[in-house]
Amino acid sequence: MHYRRVKAKGASYFFTVNLAQRNKSILIDNIDLLRQVFKRVQKRHPFKIEAIVILPEHLHTIWTLPEGDNDYPTRWMLIKSAFPRQLPKTESRNKSRLKKAERGIWQRRYWEHLIRNDKDFSTHMNYIHFNPVKHGHVKCAVDWPYSSIHQCIEKSVLESNWGCDGAVEFDGFDFGEM
């Protein structure tokens, strides 16, 4: 099946990518490996990570692609195939995944959203940084170690107590979480 996706060249996109088994913590248990995979893919297929949060079983990120480039599917394919290759084979796989030689670590699809303007960008960035609080991992966004919020605080884009009171507005957006 071929999914229709918006593919604007040189644009910024918000993504949600989930593990197949949402009760696992593979992403944070293997955070250094995940970071290495992202860096290798970025080196071969450049993109800028504007914001990112890695949770135990899913991640959210905003990428900006280079001028004239709209090939985020290849980047995700490389990340989603390289990461599991370096993990022990402990997951169960159904017949379909076995037939396609898939590990079964990731959900096959991912959520993407074309960032349309500055307000859209800001809303999605806030969502990314607030996500560990939303899921009950921490009381304050800054307490989650696997987030770009720390760079935003260093650059004075956000205050260190941002999101601690839970008063963050998302304008009713759908962010691709289940």
Image: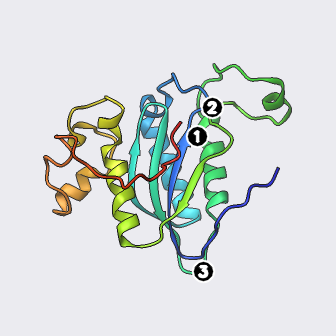
> Which residue ends up furthest to the front in the rendered image?
172
* Residue furthest bottom in the image: 68
Label 3 belongs to which residue? 68
Residue 135 drawn above or below residue 44? above
- Say whether disc 2 or disc 3 marks the residue closer to the N-terminus: 3
Foreground disc of the pair 1, 3 = 3
Inter-mark Cα distance, 2 to 3: 31 Å
Tag 2: amino acid: Ile
**Whole-percent x and y of residue 142?**
21, 43
Count the numbered circles shown: 3
Residue 19 is tagged as none
- Please state the horizontal and vertical placement of residue 127, each as a whole percent of the image: 36, 50
Residue that carries the numbered disc 1 in the rendered image: 83
Q: CA distance from mark 2 to mark 1?
A: 9 Å
| Residue linked to disc 2 | 105
How packed is label 1: few (under 14 Cα within 10 Å), some, or many (20 or more)? some
Question: For this rendering, which residue is in front, 165 or 46?
Answer: 165
Q: Amino acid at mark 1?
A: Phe
Closer to the chain start, of discs 1 and 3, is 3
Dot 2 crowding, Cα within 10 Å, few <14, some 14–19, many 20+: many
